[in-house]
Amino acid sequence: MTADLIVVGGGPVGLGTALYAARAGLATTVLEPREGDIDKACGEGLLPGGLAALAQLGVAPAGFELTGITYRAPGVRATVAFRAGPGRGVRRTVLHGALRAAALGSGVRLRSCAATALEATGDRVVVHCADGSHEVAGGVIAADGLHSPTRRRLGLDRPSERRQRFGQRRHFRIEPWTDRVEVHWGPRAEAYVTPVADNLVGVAVLSSERAPYTTHLEQFPELSERLQGAPAAGGVRGAGPLRQRCAAPVHGRVLLVGDASGYVDALTGEGISLGLAHGRAAVDAIVRGRPESYAPAWRSLNRVPYAATGLLVRATRASWVRERIVPAAAAAPWLFGAAVHRLEAMS
C-alpha cells in the first residue's frame, strides 16, 4: 500500500511523530509488531516541555503531577522547582495507550507488523514486512528504539568506546511521599523515584555495574527504608546498554528519531521531550521535500541535552566526583536550577 510517510516503530515517539505527520496532512502508516499498550524500563517522568508538546497534539495522559526535581544523598539534598509549568509522572503503558488512541483518531493507519528491509527506488522507499507484504512511501521515519534494527540495516550503527550503563525499573504500591522526581545518588548507581499515580511509585536504577535490582537498591538506605513493606507491582524490567551511537540521522529518504538516532544516557530524563522534538523536525523536513535538512535540526536539538548528559556521565565515573555532586548542587542552587530549566523547557 502507498502512503506519504511510513513510521517504523510504534512506541510513544513513533506515535507522536505520526500525529505530527497527520496534522501536516500526510497519509501515514505506522509499523509496529507488538500489540496492545507497550511497556518499557524507563523513568516515566515527563518534563514540562514534553508534557506541553503532548498537549499540543491533543494528548493528555493520566498520571501524577510533578513540581520539580530533588537530588538526594545521605545527609544532603538539592531541590529545584519547574518554572515552565508542572511535569507529570505517567505509566509507560498509559502514555502509549493515549498516543495510540490519538493516532487512530487522527486517521493514522497502524499495522501490527515488523519491518524487515528497506529499499530506495528513486523518489520512493519500499519497506518490506515480516508477513511478506510491503509498504511504499515518499519517506520513512524510523522510531524503532534504542537498539534500532533500521539503524543497523542502514549501516549507521557505531560502537561506543565508553563503559556502558544499564537500567532497571520496578513499581511499588505505595502512596507517593513527594510531588517531585527524586534522584538518589549512591556510590555506584543512581535511583530515580517517580510517582505515577496516587498509590504507585516507579523506581528506576541506572548503573554501569551488572547486578540484581535488589542489590542496587541496597546502595540507598533511606530509599530502601521508605519502600520497606511496600508490595512490588509487577516484575523488574531492564534496558541497555544505554549509550548508542549513530553515524547520521538521515540516510536518503530515511530519517531516524528518538533513541533510534542515538542515545547518551537516561540521567537527565529528557527522552520523550527530545524524541517528540525530533519527530516534529523530521516531519517538517519530509513536508518540505528536503529530508537532508533534518540533520542540522537534529544536531541543534541535541546540543543542550547531549552536552548536559555527557558531562554528568563522564563526571560520575570517579567515585570522589559522585560523592560531591549533590553537595555541589546544594551549594550552588542557581547553577543546578539553570541546568534543569534548560532541559524542562525542551519541546
Image: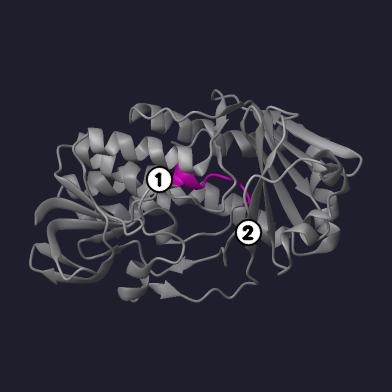
The correct choice, above or below, for 290 with respect to 188 in the image is above
Percent position (x, y) of residue 240?
A: 57, 65
Q: Is residue 273 magenta?
A: yes
Q: Residue furthest right?
A: 75
Left or right? Give the position of 192 relative to 286. Answer: right
Under circle 2, the secondary element is: strand
Asked whether 43 or 98 is in front, the reply is 98
Amino acid on which the number 1 mark rests in the picture: Pro
Q: Which residue is located at x 38 percent, y 52 percent?
A: 298
Q: How many marks?
A: 2
Disc ID at residue 167: 2
Which numbered disc covers residue 12?
A: 1
Estimate the spatial distance between the alpha carbons at disc 1 and disc 2, rounded to whole Å: 19 Å
79 on left or right of 241:
right
Q: Residue at x 81, y 44 (%)?
A: 326
- Tell me which residue sits at (66%, 30%) in the image: 199
Q: How is the image coloured?
A: one colour
Could you say where residue 97 lies in the image, as x and y percent from the top left?
39, 39
